[in-house]
Every structure is written in structure tokens, then in C-alpha cells.
């Protein structure tokens, strides 16, 4: 009987945490991940992980701090996976680790947006 009471109390407490902190967790994740669907998934993974490990929550921090710590780990896992798979996460291709690939074309010429601009005064001083 005691385990049923504890399970019911845990469920009620967890539901309270979800109601109190879901909006802040979503806002935090959406500010750090380009795709809102991925941010939503990360928050869901956070809540599932928190539910599965709730009995280990020692209460040494607030539930909010604990949930955000879990979410931060989920975000790190997401970016590690994105880096390994070469996914585009912030507008730049993650697999272009070579700076040359970012500023030169395959023939070794400058990409237009990175080409150095010559100043007319610089030419006169060299003569």
C-alpha cells in the first residue's frame, strides 16, 4: 500500500513541476535551438528523463534547477550529435572544420564574401 501512495504522491508532484516549469523550459530550449520542433522534443526528453530518475532527486537544489540541468545536458547531447553527423544547426555547415573550405572555393580562389578588399591608399604607399 505504501508504494501506491508514494507513486501517487510522486505523480502529483511531477505534474506540478511540469505545470510550473514547462513554459520556461520551452523558452530556454527555443532560444538555443534553431528548429522549434527539436526544442520541443528536447524538453519532452528532459521531462521523460526527470520522471524516470525522480526517485534519485535528492532535493539539494530546486526542482527548477534540476530540470534545467537535465535540459542543458540534452542540449549538449543534441549539439554533439549534430556535430558528429554534420547537421546544419546555426546557419553554417558543421562538417566544414577546415577554415580554407569556408573562405576558398574548390579551385583555391577567394569566395566573394571573404575576398580581401584593396584600398586605393594602400597601393600608393607601396610604390
Image (tube, rainbow, N blue to C red):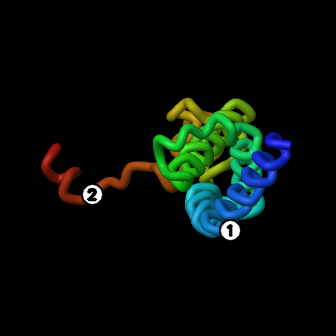
For residue 106, say whether it is visible: no
Q: Is residue 80 above or below residue 124?
A: above
Quadrant assignment for the C terminus: top left
Q: Nearer the viewer, mark 1 or mark 2?
A: 1
Residue at x-position 69% and y-position 45%: 50
Residue 37 vs residue 29: left or right?
Answer: right
Q: Earlier in the sequence, mark 1 or mark 2?
A: 1
- Residue to which mark 1 is pinned: 19
Quadrant assignment for the N terminus: top right
Q: Is residue 100 above or below residue 47?
A: above
Judging depth in this view, the residue of 71 and 10 nearest the camera is 10
Labelled disc at residue 119: 2
The secondary element bearing badge 1 is classed as: helix
Residue at x-position 69% and y-position 62%: 18
Residue at x-position 70% and y-position 56%: 14
Residue at x-position 76% and y-position 46%: 6
Which of the 4 image quadrants contains residue 69? top right
The secondary element bearing badge 2 is classed as: loop
Q: Position of residue 84 (x, y in %)?
A: 69, 30
Amino acid at each position: 500500500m505504501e508504494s501506491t501512495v508514494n507513486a501517487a504522491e510522486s505523480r502529483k508532484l511531477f505534474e506540478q513541476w511540469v505545470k510550473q516549469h514547462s513554459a520556461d523550459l520551452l523558452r530556454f530550449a527555443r532560444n538555443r535551438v534553431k528548429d522549434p520542433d527539436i526544442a520541443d522534443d528536447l524538453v519532452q526528453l528532459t521531462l521523460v528523463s526527470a520522471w524516470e530518475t525522480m526517485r534519485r532527486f535528492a532535493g539539494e537544489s530546486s526542482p527548477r534547477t534540476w530540470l534545467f540541468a537535465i535540459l542543458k545536458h540534452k542540449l549538449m547531447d543534441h549539439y554533439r550529435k549534430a556535430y558528429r553527423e554534420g547537421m546544419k544547426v546555426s546557419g553554417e555547415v558543421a562538417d566544414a572544420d577546415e577554415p580554407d573550405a569556408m573562405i576558398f572555393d574548390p579551385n583555391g580562389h577567394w569566395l566573394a564574401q571573404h575576398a580581401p578588399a584593396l584600398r586605393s591608399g594602400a597601393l600608393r604607399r607601396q610604390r
